[in-house]
Image: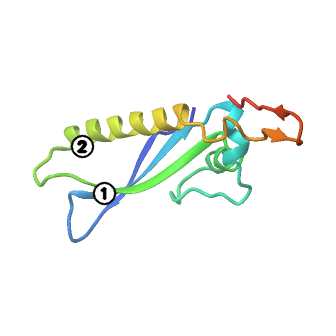
Amino acid sequence: MPRLRVIILNSTLEDPNTFQTVFWADVPTARQLHFADPNKKSAWPDATAADNQALQNGSVMEQTGTLRYQQGTGMAAIQAAMQQQWTDFQARVSNTNPWQRYGTTWDGNAWVVANNA
């Protein structure tokens, strides 16, 4: 699991109800090689060396974005909404596998079907 799940970077000067965020999700072991990037660095400047290493080795995936809430929304409601958005993000990372058949080959006679969990 990532050390943190949601990081609020800032709100905009024009609209204090708009937040720049970073979400970190755990990547299933079988798919980490597809997320690995030795040059990856978090959008959060305060990420630790271990945080960046997790991004580089593919064990953690980062998503950045902008989230806007209605004027007057309290911080507790914003936090609850961000928690739900993180839960949805983690579910997508855990349950979506575009590499399930990665490495499947056909040599002209027979198929070798890969099943990458």
In screen coordinates, is 77 left or right of 95?
A: left
Q: Which corner quadrant holds the N terminus?
A: top right
- Which quadrant of the structure image shows residue 85? top left
Where does residue 25 sit, x and y in percent of width and height? 52, 39
Q: Residue at x 28, y 66 (%)?
A: 12
Residue farthest toward the front in the current orientation of the protein:
109
Residue contact between numbered discs 1 and 2, judged by CB atoms under 8 Å: yes
**Residue 75 vertical position relative to residue 47 in the rendered view, above or below:** above
Q: Can you identify the residue that label 2 sits on?
A: 78
Neighbourhood count class around disc 1 (C-alpha, 10 Å): few under 14, some 14–19, many 20 upward: some
- Which quadrant of the structure image shows residue 114? top right
Q: Amino acid at mark 1?
A: Phe
Q: Can you identify the residue that label 1 sits on?
A: 19
Where does residue 75 sit, x and y in percent of width and height? 21, 43
Q: Secondary structure at mark 2?
A: helix
Q: Residue at x 79, y 41 (%)?
A: 103
Q: Residue at x 46, y 39 (%)?
A: 5
Q: Along the polypeptide, which appears first: circle 1 or circle 2? A: 1
Q: Residue at x 78, y 38 (%)?
A: 104
